[in-house]
Amino acid sequence: MRLKTILTGTLTIIITSALIAGMPAADAAEQQDNGAVVSMRSFSRQSQERKNLLSESVNVESDGSWTMIDSNIGDALIANADRQTAEINARKASEEKKKQEEAERRAEAEKEKQEAAEAASRNAIRNAPTDSIVNIPTITRDAASSEHGADIANNATKHIGDAMWCTDLASAALNESGISFGVHWPEEYMNVPGAVNIGTDLSDAEPGDLIIYNRTGANGSHNDHISVYIGNGMAVHGGWNYRPDVQLASASLSNGVYTIIRVM
């Protein structure tokens, strides 16, 4: 009878060991009350929540290992990266704005410089001494060494008081003297048929000579002005820089002589 009890207990232990992981403590106690030899150690049920791996971020460490990062940390890193990108873009926008403002400031300064040059050019004509229109001389042919000199000078004086620009006046004086030449920039009158460059000294000028003045920026890359010399240091000036009236004034202007052209 004792042997049977031992065998029965041994068999029970074996069966219990196989089932013990899922056996509640109450069942083991009941078997003990029935006289069977069982293990009294109980195991609580483990309930583990399954994580959604797709919601987690994956990070690669510097040593090449993979580390799972909680989704909240990943969101924080993304937010921080977005903030840094926004700050960089803001700095770039600020720098571009400063560059644009500097470019506008320089353009405004250049504009003011050009306007000042234009004003100086206008003042050169306004402040030049002017003879009375009744004292306009008539140029005789022997006053000029060139064939056309006297005609060019006299035809220029006929337009005093007219509203004409300087190049319009020069071309009119030439055309009325039998020399066909369209309206051009002042420096282009060096290409008048039969033109000879006399230099820059006004003491060498003769009636009918064309005086081309230096450029100051008033006409951009072109020379500022052209006049028709009539003698005694005087010249006929067509309208110049927003003063479109022909006048008799000094041949010497503050911006200086670029060249003197004589039409032979």
Image: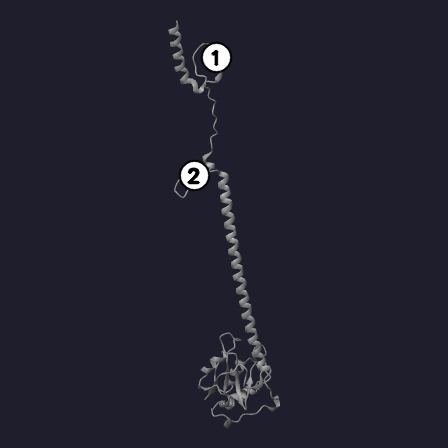
Q: Quadrant of the N terminus?
A: top left
The kind of secondary structure element at disc 2 is: strand
Q: Residue furthest front?
A: 2
The kind of secondary structure element at disc 1 is: helix
Give the mark toward the camera: 2 or 1.
Answer: 1
Give the numbered dot on residue 215.
none
Q: Residue at x 53, y 84 (%)?
A: 227
Q: In this orientation, which residue lies closer to the viewer: 254 or 208? A: 254
Residue highlighted by disc 2: 67
Callout 2: few (<14), some (14-19), or many (20+) C-alpha neighbours within 10 Å?
few
**Sequence-first disc among 2 and 1:** 1
**Quadrant in the rendering for residue 8:** top left
**Quadrant in the rendering for residue 250:** bottom right
Q: Do we see residue 17 in this rendering? A: yes
- List x then y, in percent, for residue 66: 41, 39
- List x then y, in percent, for residue 132: 62, 89
Q: What colouring does the structure picture have?
A: one colour
Residue 177 vs 14, above or below: the answer is below
Tell me the kind of residue under disc 2: Thr
Residue highlighted by disc 1: 30
Tell me the kind of residue under disc 1: Glu
Q: In this orientation, which residue lies closer to the viewer: 162 or 61? A: 61
Contact check, label 2 and label 1, Cβ < 8 Å: no
Q: Do we see residue 244 in this rendering? A: no
- List x then y, in percent, for residue 161: 60, 84
- List x then y, in percent, for residue 147: 47, 91
Q: Report the number of discs.
A: 2
Residue 202 vs 42, above or below: the answer is below
Residue 205 vs 64, above or below: the answer is below
Label 2, label 1: how far apart the Cα atoms are:
48 Å
